[in-house]
Image: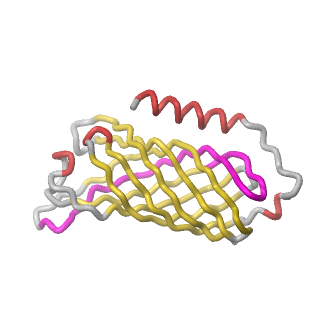
């Protein structure tokens, strides 16, 4: 997993070094400023041999063709019995990420690196004895977007979601593969 982390980190660094060039067919004024999207997400908790699936929403504000600010929330509704032996007997997860993407874009596609700090909340489920905790998360990875029409974007995210288990597991950081796919409407 450590090799994957360094691979993703190197890919993001390379994307950030790519010269910001605009495609001839597209000027800055043609890139929609706001994107509102929905996605399906898989989060692989590597240290606990568990994979969760969930749904989420994303809001992006494009400052330029190459740089955007993003907010994303995901909800993983599966209740895990003694999830990682860290939280309540029945727990669901909520994730919030806030950060930036940077890369290159044409009128038909874009490829970006992303870095988004945030949190993951291991919350109460149906158990009346539930315990909850909120842990720091950092999503580092890449994004591929396709633009079949100007107001629609199809998106694939692949990243390493680092989670710092401080209050729950005695203090360790976990590398976790997260893959999301979705659609966005651009204004």
Residue 167 falls inside the magenta stretch: no
In this rendering, the answer to whether 41 lies above or below 86 is below
In this rendering, the answer to whether 90 lies above or below 168 is below
Question: Looking at this view, is 151 or 168 the one in front?
Answer: 151
**Rendered residue at 39%/57% (across/down):** 95
**Rendered residue at 48%/46% (across/down):** 139
Q: Quadrant of the N terminus?
A: top left
Colour scheme? secondary structure
In this rendering, the answer to whether 84 lies above or below 94 is above
Whole-percent x and y of residue 3? 45, 27
Residue at the extreme right: 24
**Rendered residue at 43%/57% (across/down):** 41
Q: Is residue 40 left or right of residue 155?
A: left
Q: Quadrant of the C terminus?
A: bottom right
Q: Is residue 11 left or right of residue 20?
A: left
Whole-percent x and y of residue 170? 22, 37
Residue 117 falls inside the magenta stretch: yes
Whole-percent x and y of residue 96? 43, 57
Q: Main secondary structure of the magenta part?
A: strand
Q: How many marks?
A: 0
Residue at the extreme front: 148
Question: Looking at this view, is 178 or 102 the one in front?
Answer: 178
**Rendered residue at 64%/55% (across/down):** 145
> What is the span of residues highlighted in magenta in the rendered image?
101-127
Q: Is residue 1 left or right of residue 123?
A: right
């Amino acid at each position: 997993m450590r090799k994957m982390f360094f691979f993703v980190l190197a890919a993001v660094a390379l994307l950030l070094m790519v010269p910001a060039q605009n495609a001839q067919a597209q000027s800055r004024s043609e890139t929609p400023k706001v994107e509102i999207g929905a996605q399906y997400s898989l989060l692989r908790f590597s240290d606990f041999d568990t994979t969760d699936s969930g749904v989420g929403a994303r809001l992006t504000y494009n400052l330029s063709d190459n740089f955007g600010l993003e907010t994303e929330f995901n909800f993983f509704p599966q209740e895990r019995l003694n999830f990682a032996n860290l939280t309540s007997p029945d727990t669901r997860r909520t994730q919030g990420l806030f950060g930036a993407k940077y890369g290159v874009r044409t009128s038909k596609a874009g490829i970006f690196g992303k870095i988004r700090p945030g949190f993951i909340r291991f919350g109460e489920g149906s158990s009346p004895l539930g315990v909850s905790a909120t842990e720091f998360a950092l999503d580092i990875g890449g994004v591929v977007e396709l633009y079949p029409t100007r107001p629609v974007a199809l998106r694939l995210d692949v990243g390493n979601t680092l989670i710092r288990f401080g209050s729950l597991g005695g203090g360790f950081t976990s590398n976790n593969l997260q893959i999301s796919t979705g659609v966005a409407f651009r204004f």
